[in-house]
Image (cartoon, rainbow, N blue to C red):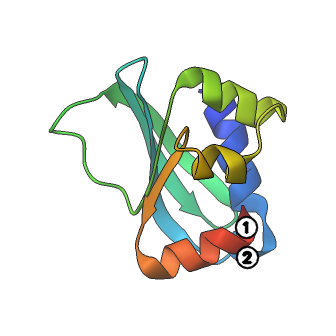
Amino acid sequence: MTALDGFVSKLASAEGARDLDRSVSCRLTDLGQVVAGRLARGAVHDMTAQADGPSVPKADIRLTMSSDDLLALTSGQLSFTPAWASGRVKLEAGLRDMLRLRSLL
């Protein structure tokens, strides 16, 4: 939770994200968990973890990765763009959000 909060908080504090109000989730494939929250007013709110499954609501911005990749991203050992390009990290969002996130990541 701490690593994910750090990663999403960096994203939320970026200048281009200050006016975003979107639900965000991160599926941790090796743990079978989805951590979800709200990206709003330049911060992340209400982060909660739940078991992965069909009952998990679909967030506006969805990340998928292993917990090891999440830790590597937050520690700076892994850059988002190469991880995304190689398929280690998946990002799903609407076109408008993808364009905005592209400049943030």
- The label nearer to you, 1 versus 2, is 1
Q: 10 Å neighbourhood of mark 1: few (<14), some, or many (≥20)?
A: some
- 1 and 2 marks in contact (CB < 8 Å): yes
Q: Nearer the viewer, residue 87 or 75?
A: 87
Q: Position of residue 1 (x, y in %)?
A: 59, 27
Amino acid residing under circle 2? Gly
> Can you tell which quarter of the image residue 88 is in?
top right
Amino acid residing under circle 1? Leu
Drawn side of residue 47 relative to residue 29, left or right: right
Q: In the displayed image of the protein, which residue is found farthest to the left?
A: 54
> Which numbered circle lies on residue 16?
2
Image: 74 above or below 17: above
Residue at 42% of width from left, 17% of height from top? 31
Q: In the displayed image of the protein, which residue is found farthest to the right?
A: 76
Q: Earlier in the sequence, mark 1 or mark 2?
A: 2
Q: Nearer the viewer, residue 79 or 14?
A: 79
Residue at 42% of width from left, 59% of height from top? 92
Mark pair 1, 2: CA separation:
7 Å
Image: 42 above or below 51: below
Residue at 73% of width from left, 67% of height from top? 104
Image: 12 above or below 73: below
Residue at 77% of width from left, 60% of height from top? 13
Q: Nearer the viewer, residue 94 or 79?
A: 79
Please, what secondary structure does the residue beneath circle 1 have? helix
Q: Position of residue 20 (x, y in %)?
A: 58, 73
Q: To which residue does mark 1 refer?
A: 104
Q: Position of residue 86 (x, y in %)?
A: 59, 45
> Which numbered circle lies on residue 42?
none
